[in-house]
């Protein structure tokens, strides 16, 4: 399991109720059920991945999180997870509002557009960056709304969303992010994980 | 009905059953069939509910028609619903004509077949009647209940009535509430039957002149709704039936005409016209949300059942929209639900034909849930 999932799993208490939005092939959900006895559900857009999840016995529904989160009641879950997909929605702000409505807490990870390699790619080569966490080229990227850790941090503050915890990931290394080291971590982290409520 | 049905498995339900229509029935037969073996812990049992024109003969050969069971694509040794591993139960619905209590049975009060004197039944009545089989087989909790179309309605009804009697549930290509179009199509079929002079207000059993034509037309109309536009076009297109050009008559020039006529013809050999009226009526009355004050989501409140909802992209009779309504209600009640729409051109009938993606999904769901259920006990 990738480092990001391990960090997310560590944030979750035993036996909590969790929804993984855009759960892919269900790797994270499966681990959460097995290792932490978590009541984990998922929603996924791609039919093949949904069928793969169902075949593993996971409770995953096929659906578009952009429009279909409204079916869940308020605070239906203790935690809602959104891993590296916020930037792919047409209206990330609305999706985020839904996540905060249906989950007591929300864990969001974002590929950090403020990472130094990305900045360097544009600065030195004048080309749209292609990296490990952002492997697409400009013409086929599903990412419509890229942001940096700093952007999202400021966004939460402006929207009065409580930031409980921020963790930066660089390869296998992880570090806590606070207001005080935000500039530096925004430069050095490939991915940022936010626990918000 | 030219078949002898004396030698099939049945139980006599002795407990009085108060039907939704107000009448009470008792000491009536429910016919059923089983496949595979019930294990010692009795945790490998699966109850399958059949659709409108189905019967209890799911797999293997149907001893009455001498043809294959209606779901041999999915059920059998080594198949998606594996009879080497699971114990499969399927009963003929109340109102049916394969040995369960239905309108062609003799009313002991006057020694006449019931005909239209048979009480109007509902999906709920059917499910409650079938539950007696679990009691008979001493199974306290099933691994799964599943069924397509009307079978799916029974699945939902079963879960609403007996939340603790199954670990998982798979309603396929179904709905929680029969809509106007679905009722309309059933009404078309019923009118076809009732317009046949031989139907004779349901009294046709004595002189063996059954309303074959009316029932065949009903079947033809229904059969069209089971297939998709694309499926029909690919299979038949404008192909002619064993001829080079039009004959300028009303005989079956086109293959599709010939196909539908054949479907109608074979159907009347095995199905009772009055049963068709009664069962289709039960479907029309089905509206699960009506049974609960706060709507459909209340039906599944505090359930631990694991649901898998499946729809097919080209099914216009019970479209994905109907399945999504079930998913939404389940999610609203916090139930445990998985949902997939299978992309296929095979229409409503997709669940009956060999549709690998569908069968693979069912198999994975059942097998993985069996592992969980096994260890739970």
Image (cartoon, coloured by chain):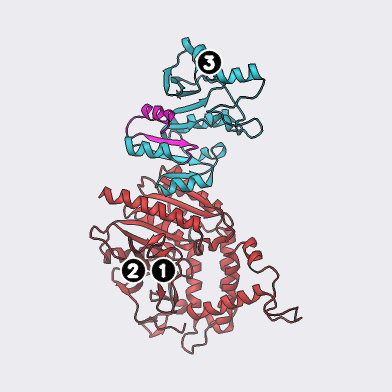
**Is B263 a magenta residue?**
no
Chain assigned red: B
Residue A72 placement (x, y as % from top left):
47, 39
Labels 3 and 2 in the same subunit: no
**Label 3, label 2: how far apart the Cα atoms are:** 66 Å
Q: Do the residues under discs 3 and 2 have CB atoms within 8 angstroms? A: no
Q: Do the residues under discs 3 and 1 have CB atoms within 8 angstroms? A: no
Q: Quadrant of the C terminus of chain A?
A: top left
Chain assigned cyan: A
Residue B136 — which label?
Answer: none
Residue carrying label 1? B58
* Stretch in magenta: A1-24
Q: For numbered disc 3, what is the local secondary structure? A: helix
**Label 2, label 1: how far apart the Cα atoms are:** 9 Å
Q: Local crowd at mark 2 within 10 Å, few (<14), some, or many (≥20)?
A: many
Q: Is residue B50 left or right of residue B216?
A: left
Residue carrying label 3? A187
Q: Quadrant of the N terminus of chain A?
A: top left
Chain letter belonging to callout 3:
A
Q: At 50% from the left edge and 12% from the top edge, which residue is drawn?
A: A184
On screen, residue A111 above or below B75: above
Q: Is residue A129 left or right of residue B301?
A: right
Residue B174 seen by the camera? no
Q: Is residue A15 left or right of residue B310?
A: left
Q: Local crowd at mark 1 within 10 Å, few (<14), some, or many (≥20)?
A: many
Residue carrying label 2? B34
Q: Nearer the viewer, mark 3 or mark 1?
A: 3
Q: For numbered disc 2, what is the local secondary structure? A: strand
């Amino acid at each position: 399991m990738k480092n990001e999932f391990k960090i997310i799993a560590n944030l979750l208490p035993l036996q909590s109720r969790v929804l993984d939005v855009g759960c892919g092939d269900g790797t994270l959900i499966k681990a959460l059920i097995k290792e932490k006895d978590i009541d984990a559900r998922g929603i996924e857009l791609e039919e093949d991945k949904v069928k793969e999840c169902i075949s593993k016995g996971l409770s995953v529904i096929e659906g578009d999180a952009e429009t279909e989160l409204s079916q869940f009641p308020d605070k239906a879950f203790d935690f809602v997870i959104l891993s590296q997909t916020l930037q792919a929605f047409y209206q990330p702000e609305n999706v985020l509002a839904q996540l905060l409505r249906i989950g007591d807490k929300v864990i969001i990870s974002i590929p950090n557009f403020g990472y130094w390699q990305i900045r360097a790619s544009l600065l030195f080569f004048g080309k749209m960056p292609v990296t490990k966490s952002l492997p697409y080229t400009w013409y086929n990227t599903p990412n419509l709304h890229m942001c940096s850790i700093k952007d999202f941090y400021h966004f939460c503050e402006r929207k009065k969303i409580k930031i409980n915890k921020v963790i930066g990931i660089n390869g296998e290394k992880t570090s806590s992010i606070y207001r005080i080291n935000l500039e530096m971590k925004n430069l050095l982290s490939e991915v940022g994980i936010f626990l918000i409520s | 009905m030219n078949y002898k049905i004396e030698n099939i498995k049945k139980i006599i339900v002795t407990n009085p059953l108060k039907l939704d229509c107000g009448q009470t029935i008792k000491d009536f037969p429910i016919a059923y069939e089983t496949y595979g073996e019930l294990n010692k812990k009795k945790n490998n049992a699966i109850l399958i509910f059949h659709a409108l024109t189905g019967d209890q003969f799911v797999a293997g050969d149907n001893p009455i028609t001498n043809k294959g069971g209606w779901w041999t694509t999915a059920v059998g040794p080594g198949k998606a619903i594996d009879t080497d591993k699971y114990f499969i139960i399927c009963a003929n619905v109340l109102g049916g004509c394969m040995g369960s209590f239905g309108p062609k049975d003799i009313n002991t009060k006057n020694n006449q077949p019931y005909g239209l004197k048979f009480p109007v039944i509902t999906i709920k009545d059917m499910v409650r009647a079938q539950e007696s089989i679990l009691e008979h087989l001493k199974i306290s909790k099933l691994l799964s209940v599943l069924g397509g179309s009307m079978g799916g309605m029974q699945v939902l009804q079963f879960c609403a009535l007996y939340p603790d009697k199954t670990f998982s549930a798979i309603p396929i290509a179904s709905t929680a509430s029969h809509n106007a179009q679905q009722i309309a199509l059933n009404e078309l079929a019923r009118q076809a039957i009732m317009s046949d002079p031989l139907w004779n207000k349901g009294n046709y059993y004595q002189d063996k002149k059954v309303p074959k034509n009316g029932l065949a037309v009903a079947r033809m109309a229904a059969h069209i709704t089971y297939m998709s536009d694309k499926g029909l076009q690919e299979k038949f297109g404008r192909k002619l039936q064993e001829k080079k050009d039009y004959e300028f008559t009303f005989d079956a020039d086109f293959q599709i005409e010939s196909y539908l006529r054949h479907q109608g013809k074979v159907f009347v050999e095995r199905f009772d016209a009055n049963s068709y009226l009664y069962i289709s009526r039960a479907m029309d009355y089905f509206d699960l949300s009506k049974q609960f004050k706060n709507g459909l989501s209340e039906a599944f409140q505090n359930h631990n059942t694991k649901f898998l909802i499946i729809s097919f992209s080209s099914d216009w009779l019970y479209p994905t929209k109907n399945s999504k309504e079930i998913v939404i209600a389940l999610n609203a009640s916090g139930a445990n639900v998985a949902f997939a729409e299978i992309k296929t051109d095979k229409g409503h009938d997709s669940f009956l034909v060999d549709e690998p993606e569908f069968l693979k999904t069912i198999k994975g769901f059942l097998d993985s849930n069996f592992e969980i259920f096994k260890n739970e006990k």
